[in-house]
Image (cartoon, rainbow, N blue to C red):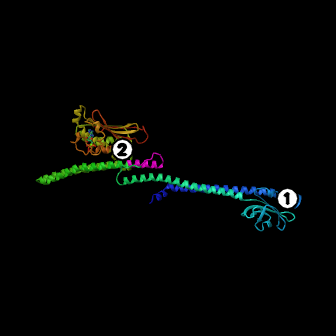
Amino acid sequence: MTALGKLIRTTAFKLTLFYLAIFILFAASLLGYFALNTRRLITEQITATVNGEITGLSEQYAQGGIRRLVIVVDLRSRRPGSSLYLVTTPTGEGLAGNVGSLEPGVLDHPGWLETSYRRLDAPEGNDHRALVQVVQLPGGFHLLVGRDLEERERLFGIIANAGQWSLALVIVLGLVGGFFVSRRVLSRIDAMTGTAQTIMAGDLSGRLPVAGTGDELDRLAENVNAMLERIEALMRGLKEVSDNIAHDLKTPLTRLRNRCEQALRHASGDADYRAALEATIAESDDLIRTFDALLLIARAESGQARDNMTEFDAAEIARDVGELYEPLADEKGLALTVEAPVAAPIRGNRELVSQALANLVDNAIKYAGPDSSKLNGVAAEIVVKAGNDGDRITLSVADRGPGIADADRGRVVERFVRLEQSRSAPGSGLGLSLASAVARLHGGELKLEDNHPGLRSTIALPRAGPAGAAAPTGSTGAAGTG
Ligand SMILES: Nc1ncnc2c1ncn2[C@@H]1O[C@H](COP(=O)(O)OP(=O)(O)OP(=O)(O)O)[C@@H](O)[C@H]1O
Ligand SMILES: [Mg+2]
């Protein structure tokens, strides 16, 4: 498409044409109305004057007969101006006046009419138009009084001419204006199209240009840019996740493979093969657990899990999880206490919230064993709490272990991140990622704080129902002390 073709097809240009057409129509109607009214006014003026003269001349005739009329008409005919007079005998011979020739038959029709004539003093000139009134006087004489219409036509011509010129000017200015406006809009759209093409070619960092005028194109560009920003962040996240997954799953898979190879090479009997197979199954189970955790995180992050939202008591969750982990804590010589004295109503996915809290308790048991507590010089204990904090419900797990250094608290919630100090414990680095994703899914957050010593991890979620509606549940849940 040529540049001009593109320009003409723009909405801005079409709008200009539309307004131009409306304006022309309006201007033409106005000028037409003006011209027609002027013409009518002039005609009315002529009619009134001629009527007056006819009355006067008829009186002259009534008083002094044809002689007097001829003298008066003769006198008036000599005055300069556009007035026309003619007095004729009943047979049509001229007696007085300034009209030389008329269209044939004019004098036979008394009344008003428009006719062409020639003046007596300019017999060779052009025919002129005139508005005349013919009356038949008593005695059969004809009296004609009229006005030359040249002036009226000239005025009409001037108006028509002015109208034509101004219309032409409006059209030219309108087209030029439309052309410039369209070109400006088009150049901005072209710039946007260019950016869109680079983005489609794979460069997600491109952004639509914003002119800074705050107009509708700017608003559109700003919104599209915000959308691109979000898409870019999501794509970056996605890439990071897939990189992590590829990287972190490679190690256990390699281990699995090597174990099989070892067994093939060195196993010397059924018992060896069995042991190798059992180890392989255990390793595969770990892998499956990792995949399950990843899928769960993805579900929480995508918001899919919002379908299963119900209202439930988080205090109950704290008690259930405490009960579930009590034997494990016991086994490790840790005291696990649950403090959930009041109802903590939240609206959410019960299964996911339970899993998130379980992950925090699991970490506390795994990383804050009695040995580390002894190092810290405090009793080894884990406290699981469900409480109300303003318009938030909190589910927290506090331990007396080594805690997490300030600098590491940001990154431990990322997928597959495990701190050097805890490499010896089993795990895949997904527990806190899930807890954090679940908190975000519910419009809350996961906080990691210093428990002086130890770690206090808290999931804070919006409370369901009216604020401040905390009511005692009656049962002070304690999953026991070990
Ligand atoms: N209570 C805690 N005390 C000390 N360090 C902790 C504690 N909880 C988590 N961490 C550190 O944060 C890291 C990430 O924890 P996360 O729960 O995400 O993964 P993981 O426990 O290593 O593995 P997974 O939970 O997937 O089995 C842990 O590897 C550990 O280094
Ligand atoms: Mg964990």
Q: Relative to 383, is 137 above or below?
A: below
Disc sitting over residue 71 in the figure? 1
> 61 or 178, which is in the foreground?
61
Kind of residue sitting beneath label 2: Arg
Residue sitting at 66 percent across and 58 percent down? 157
Q: Position of residue 480 (x, y in %)?
A: 28, 38
Q: Position of residue 370 (x, y in %)?
A: 22, 36
Kind of residue sitting beneath label 1: Ile
Q: Which residues are magenta?
A: 209-229
> 5 or 87, which is in the foreground?
87
Res 334 seen here: yes
Q: Residues within 10 Å of mark 2 (few under 14, many from 20)?
A: some
Disc sitting over residue 440 in the figure? 2
On the image, which quarter does residue 324 sit in? top left
Disc sitting over residue 148 in the figure? none
Label count reads 2
Q: Residues within 10 Å of mark 1 (few under 14, many from 20)?
A: some
Marks 2 and 1, Cα distance to the nearest angstrom? 114 Å
User: On the rendered image, what quadrant is the N terminus found in?
Assistant: bottom left
Residue sitting at 49 percent across and 55 percent down? 11
On the image, which quarter does residue 115 sit in? bottom right
Residue sitting at 78 percent across and 68 percent down? 105
Q: Can residue 212 be found in the magenta stretch?
A: yes
> 463 or 260, which is in the foreground?
260
Please give left or right for residue 450 compared with residue 262 in the image.
right
Q: Can residue 58 be found in the magenta stretch?
A: no
Please give left or right for residue 332 compared with residue 123 in the image.
left
